[in-house]
Image (cartoon, grey):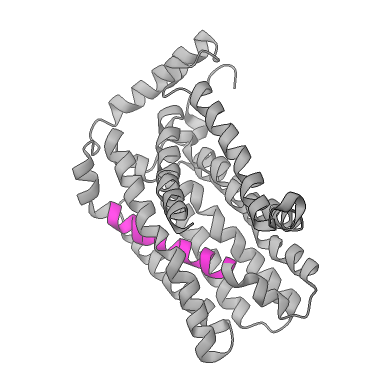
Amino acid sequence: FYILRALLGIAEAGFFPGVVFYLSLWFPAGYRGRISSYFMVAIPLSTVIGAPLSGIILGMDGMLGFSGWQWLFVIEAVPAIVLSVIVFWYLTDRPAEAAWLEPDQRNWLQARMDAENKEDAGGHHSIAAALKSPRVLALGLVCFGAVITNYGVSFFLPQIISGFGLSALATGFVAALPYVVGAVGMIWWGRRSDTRGERKIHTAIAIAVAVISLIVSTMLSDPVLKIIAISIAGFGMFAYLGPFWAIPNTFLRGPALAAGIAAINSIANVAGFTGPYIVGYVKTLTGSFEGGLLALAGLGCVAIVILLCLPIERTAPLARTKPHPAE
């Protein structure tokens, strides 16, 4: 079982950076804030939809001789398996190869991507250059500081809410609120970033909203106000994703972009262990979640400072780019 779990982790490790790189081959720079948000909105939505769905599937315990967790693994794996076949045969590496686009659409999109690549010829192109780039390391630390707030809150949010005396069902619904706010907010924020052609400040503002809201939540004793604060934090915890993942495209190209995204993502994923550990450790020492949330907020502040110190080029505002006639 542990070997299979390790293989799962190895297989999925390249998925996220691979998709972010793939999007850069298909969508002009002016669209990447919103496109990244469209892709990554699955993160909060999967929690909103997946949590109650998983509860229902676990209720199938004993059916046909299988445990609930076995049904969970099988049923939730089937869509991924089916989609992997569809993606392999349907999607193409580049717009010029897409038979499902009209010829004028293919030609227009590929010409625009080629024009952008020529204009961006000065970026880093080699994998070695990407891995040695100080900006890649810095962006990894920024993403670590942003992701750690998400992991730290998401792991312990149900416990925080259940402490209000709510039922298990009510806890599930209330715990979904920050993710609903995050899903809506990240779509709007990604589009806003594209419209203004700005990435750094949009990323910093979103992380700042998460940090400030977490700090405020520790000062509130009223359950309703505390949930409102954490829900606002949900906006920041997800809204930064679209603008942030459009940043590597501004200075990395080709194989360097793929390697840089993977390196940034690898550094950030350490937060998956660190965030819950910090909250749990502080909770053990103090008996409350407030100290852990403040620690996460502090790391978020460090991320903002690092980000604001980085030189990050702006992209052409989407409103000034020439769209395809079909848009």
Identify the residue at image location x=69%, y=55%.
54
Quick check: can you spot residue 92?
yes
Q: Give the camera-side residue of 317 and 45.
A: 45
| Residue 83: image location, x then y, percent | 58, 33
Majority secondary structure in the magenta region: helix
Q: Is residue 77 above or below residue 222?
A: above
State which region is magenta.
136-154
Q: Position of residue 29 (x, y in %)?
A: 42, 34
Residue that extends furthest to the top in the rendered view of this protein: 103
> 4 left or right of 131?
right
Q: Residue furthest bottom?
A: 286
Work out whether residue 45 or residue 190 is closer to the camera in this orientation and state it: 45
User: Can the viewer see residue 312 in this picture?
Assistant: no
Q: Point out the image quarter for the C terminus.
A: top right
Q: Residue at x 47, y 54 (%)?
A: 5
Write the residue at 62% across / 83% down: 219
Which picture quadrant has residue 299? bottom left
127 up-or-down from 299: above or below: above
x and y, in percent, of residue 292 in the image: 51, 80
Whether residue 135 sits left or right of residue 199 in the image: it is: left
Q: Is residue 152 magenta?
A: yes
Query: Front-most of 207 and 14?
Result: 14
Rendered residue at 44%/15% (across/down): 97
Q: Is residue 165 left or right of residue 110?
A: right
Location of residue 166 in the rendering, given as x and y in whole percent from the top left corner: 79, 75
